[in-house]
């Protein structure tokens, strides 16, 4: 089987990219809509963070389901729920029915369904391409996400010259329902997966998988450093404020600068395709997340939109590589029966992004954008250096695919 031309892999790749685009498109639209309504970076962070804050609570459930039941069916059901949440969100905003309240409520529903479906989506790669090709599968997944999400903000910028921000919320259910209907092809055509655990198995609980991951000297540091996602969350509510108040950009300019993020993801994906699992080492992964942090801070020092866009491009290139390497490691290092639940532990770490949204918005209003980002960058760099120097298992870690 050749991954690049495998029909099931293509469907999985495309539907995942569409779903990934709704996450960032929602982020762009909610950030700008809430900023215009409230003029508060704290409110931007609070409302944008809700789907991600759900991750620590819902993702472990998704991990158990991914190990016990059909991943393709779980993914289809959760994707349909997401799409339905998006259409209700669009209705509430365009009809001005308590929009800020319903952004919070419906974002929670979208977050729960996305968190439960996440482990099934990521581990369906193993079902489709096999463990021996998972590094390349993850690389191509990040490439597809990068391409789609480079197009989405630029397209949003173009559409904002024609439509209002409120009207563009209708694109979210359109994209999400398209993704769900294409997943139905996998539900019908893709052969059933082999069950990793039985419902009556003594090691089928989330507690057992947590103990397993904690006791593994290679997996434990990776999950601890998953907290590095915090800095990404801290910066997100601050980026639109910086674009508007410092770079003097409107909604169109903000969308175009944001698209540099995803062009960076494309370049990062090419490196992943070229080097595969060789990048999934402890030293490389910590280097990537620290470089992401540094270039993100440089973004908040830039006064020229083009230079700022370059720093966003570079920072997202490094975090794309880091995320793909983390997933590859967590799919190859654990025993197969724990794979879904171990991956869900990293999905849970994405909840720190939500904490970062709130923390970044609050601190941005109180101590300023630059100081907020600088503190976050220093914390992440220090944490990675401590783990690198204290854990030889992580420092010397490499995976074989």
Image (tube, helix red, strand yellow):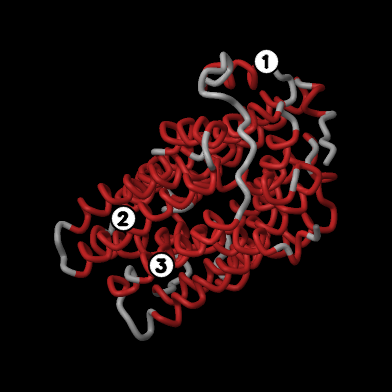
Q: Position of residue 278 (x, y in %)?
A: 85, 45
Q: Is residue 196 above or below residue 247?
A: above
Disc nearer the start of the sequence (1/3):
1
Closer to viewer: mark 1 or mark 2: 2
Image quarter of the N terminus: bottom right
Closer to viewer: mark 1 or mark 3: 1
Judging depth in this view, the residue of 279 and 14 nearest the camera is: 14
Asked whether the beta carbons under mark 1 and mark 3 sit within 8 Å of each other, the answer is no
Disc nearer the start of the sequence (2/3):
2
Asked whether the beta carbons under mark 1 and mark 2 sit within 8 Å of each other, the answer is no
Q: Position of residue 189 (x, y in %)?
A: 58, 57
Q: CA distance from mark 2 to mark 3?
A: 29 Å
Q: Where is residue 85, by image quadrant?
A: bottom left
The numbered disc on residue 244 is: 3
- Does residue 379 appear in the picture of this structure? no
Image quarter of the C terminus: top right
Determine whether the residue tagged by mark 1 lies in a helix, strand or loop: helix
Disc 2 marks which residue? 85
Judging depth in this view, the residue of 42 and 276 nearest the camera is: 276
Closer to viewer: mark 2 or mark 3: 2
Residue at image x 80%, y 37%?
Answer: 281
């Amino acid at each position: 089987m050749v991954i690049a031309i495998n029909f099931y892999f293509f469907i999985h790749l495309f539907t995942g990219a569409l779903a990934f685009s709704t996450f960032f498109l929602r982020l762009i639209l909610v950030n700008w809509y809430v900023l215009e309504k409230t003029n508060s970076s704290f409110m931007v962070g609070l409302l944008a963070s809700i789907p991600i804050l759900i991750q620590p609570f819902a993702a472990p459930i998704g991990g158990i389901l991914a190990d016990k039941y059909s991943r393709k069916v779980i993914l289809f059901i959760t994707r349909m729920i997401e799409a339905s949440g998006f259409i209700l969100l669009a209705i509430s905003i365009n009809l001005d029915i308590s929009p800020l309240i319903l952004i919070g409520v419906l974002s929670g529903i979208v977050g729960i369904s996305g968190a439960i479906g996440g482990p099934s989506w990521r581990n369906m790669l193993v079902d489709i391409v096999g463990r021996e090709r998972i590094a390349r599968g993850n690389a191509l997944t990040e490439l597809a996400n990068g391409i789609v999400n480079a197009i989405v903000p630029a397209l949003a910028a173009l559409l904002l010259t024609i439509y209002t921000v409120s009207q563009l919320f209708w694109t979210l259910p359109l994209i999400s329902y398209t993704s769900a209907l294409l997943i139905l092809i996998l539900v019908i055509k893709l052969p059933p997966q082999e069950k990793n655990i039985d419902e009556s198995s003594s090691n089928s609980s989330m507690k057992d998988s947590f103990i397993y991951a904690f006791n593994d000297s290679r997996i434990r540091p990776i999950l601890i450093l998953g907290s590095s996602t915090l800095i990404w969350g801290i910066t997100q509510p601050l980026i639109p404020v910086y674009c508007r108040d410092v770079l003097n950009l409107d909604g169109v300019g903000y969308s175009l600068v944001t698209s540099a993020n995803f062009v960076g993801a494309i370049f990062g994906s090419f490196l992943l395709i070229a080097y595969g699992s060789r990048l999934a080492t402890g030293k490389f992964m910590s280097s990537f997340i620290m470089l992401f942090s540094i270039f993100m801070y440089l973004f908040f020092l830039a006064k020229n939109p083009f230079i700022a866009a370059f720093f966003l491009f570079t920072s997202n290139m490094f975090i794309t590589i880091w995320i793909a390497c983390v997933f590859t490691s967590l799919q190859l290092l654990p025993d197969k029966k724990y794979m879904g639940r171990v991956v869900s532990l990293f999905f849970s770490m994405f909840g720190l992004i939500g904490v970062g949204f709130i923390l970044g918005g609050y601190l941005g209003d109180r101590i300023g954008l630059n100081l907020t980002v600088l503190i976050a960058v220093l914390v992440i760099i220090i944490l990675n250096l401590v783990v690198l120097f204290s854990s030889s298992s992580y420092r010397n870690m490499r995976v074989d695919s």
